[in-house]
Image: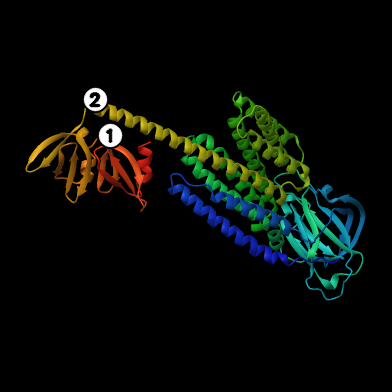
Amino acid sequence: MRLNISTKFLFARFFMLTVGFFMLTVGFFQGVTCLFSRHASICAGHVLRFCVLISLFYSIMVNATSTVHISSVSVCQDVSKNTQGTLTKVENCRSVSINQVNPKQSLVWIQVHFDVANAGQPRGRPLGLVLSAEASTTVYLNGVKIGRNGSPAEEAKNEVAGRIDKSFYLPDSLLIKQHNTLVIELSSHNRLLQIDPPIQRLLITDYQTPKDYLANHYLPVFIPLGILIIGFTYSSVLALQSNNTKQNLFIPVASLFAVIQLIAEVSRGLFDYSYPYNGIRMLTILCSSLIVSFFLLSYVCKRFLTKRRKTALTVACITTLIFVLLLDHFESKTLASVLLPMGIGTLITGYAAIQKARNALSHSVALFAFVLLTASSPNQFLDIYYYYCIALLFVFFFAQHATDYKKEQEKKRFEQDRADRLQRILDEHKEREQPTKIKINHAGKTDFISCEEICFCKGARDYVELVINNRGSVLHHNSLSELESTLPATFLRVHRSYIVNTQFITSLSRSASGTGILHLSTGDEVPVSRRIMPKVRDALG
């Protein structure tokens, strides 16, 4: 056999790292913008989602590699070796699926045969055996011991736990063209979870370290990881700035645990740990998956159910937990933890769509597509394929969250503007009923002038010129800012040097330079600065 690792991984690494840094930069910029801007725009999200979709598509294409997976082996009962450690006898063998190999509390010998067409000829890279198993192993090639991972033993007290992933170099000097024999001695006394078969991956390929192989395998997953981290940061900021923080935290919390689940998944390619710790990793994946599903379902129930929300959520959670406990295989448990809550969410949103609930149809389609894609490839669950699906689902939820936040802010601004207009009407009515009087210092004496008589105020260094209706103007020995604090709400600052009584305003026009001009009933004109124009326009209705 001849197996070559494609050189396109070199370009793939560079491409995905570049995209990853770009996405993190955009996400950081958006997060900072959202933190320091009261009404952050979500337009940049369209560009980000485009990059996400292109990256996901490309990363799926580059994940392929040429390997030969061994799915069936022979379990041997009669094995002996000499004092030099060379196998002398391997007999009484029966063929089984690799998933049926389970040493439990004993020692097991398995045998694999393979051919090498170009044995003895120069090759670019040597062959290697990649073994991923919750077990301690010793490997023999054509009777000769070529490596050990931990120390397998008949009893638990004598076993030394091996690494979860191990590569063994297959020396060219030991390879023959036909009927090469691999014999593996293994034991797994220290497994935390005795649920799935201990051997997870057994393949022959060009020799590489486990980290190299797993890095190539998990490399595309870092793009969904980047999407989830950026989405978590962005949606968390939106949730904390929204009026209903508690309800809006469902999506950020779900995305946080999706990040934890994905980190637990890729940790196998980042850290070289002994096989007993793999049980902790798998429990983390399962628990994170349950939390993600329950929080997404809580979001759906809160948004689309008007009655019996807690009842529906409780029944769904209990049903899911029962299935998780009853199923045999760990992957089946994790699959159920996702499909059942999301399937129930699809039914809830579908019913809400029939009832013409706002945005229910889009949620129903997104959830149904996710359930369909996940259920159609159960054998690829808890692999890269699944995390593409979950990333795309969260892209939809992040977009919905941002859209809801934008609508909430628009509603909030509308209500605030309406409240401000009402307050101005009340202030104007109060001013007409009981005019405010201010103390004026001019010409060495103090006078009191009713505010309803003041048309506008013009600042001039340490003095303010008060233009009085039908009485000319008066100089007031004070600054414009200090005077502004004493005037009633019927006065509006329209320029750094002007304050106007809104009761005298008849119209607002724009000059050729872009500034505004207020026309007063007295015939006077007051300039409005370009920066304050929107505020003045809103104040005048």
Residue at the (76%, 37%) spot, across then down: 327
> Quick one: 257 or 14, which is closer to the camera?
14
> Residue 271: percent from the left, percent from the top?
64, 57
Residue 245: % across, % down? 49, 36
Kindly state the secondary structure of the residue where label 2 is placed.
helix
User: In the shown orientation, is residue 539 left or right of residue 143?
Assistant: left
Q: Element type at marker 1?
A: helix
Towards the viewer: 340 or 522:
522
Q: Quadrant of the C terminus?
A: top left
Q: CA distance from mark 1 to mark 2?
A: 14 Å
Point out the residue furthest to the bottom here: 122
Residue type highlighted by circle 2: Glu
Q: In the picture shown, does residue 37 fall above or below 80?
A: above
Callout 2 crowding tier (Cα within 10 Å): few <14, some 14–19, many ≥20: few
Query: Of the residues under marks 1 and 2, which one precedes in the sequence?
Result: 2
**Quarter of image, res 251:** top right
Q: Is residue 163 visible?
A: no
Q: Nearer the viewer, residue 112 or 269?
A: 269
Residue at the image position 62 percent from the left and 55 percent from the top: 51
Could you tell me how many numbered marks the image carries?
2
Q: Can see residue 369?
A: yes
Numbered circle sitting on residue 503: 1
Three-letter amino acid code at the position of disc 1 = Gln
Residue 151 in which image quadrant? bottom right
The residue indicated by pointer 2 is: 433
**Residue 250 appears at what percent x and percent y?**
56, 38
Q: Position of residue 218 (x, y in %)?
A: 68, 56
Toward the viewer: 277 or 398? 398
Q: On the image, which quarter does residue 501 sit in?
A: top left
Q: Residues within 10 Å of mark 1 (few under 14, many from 20)?
A: some
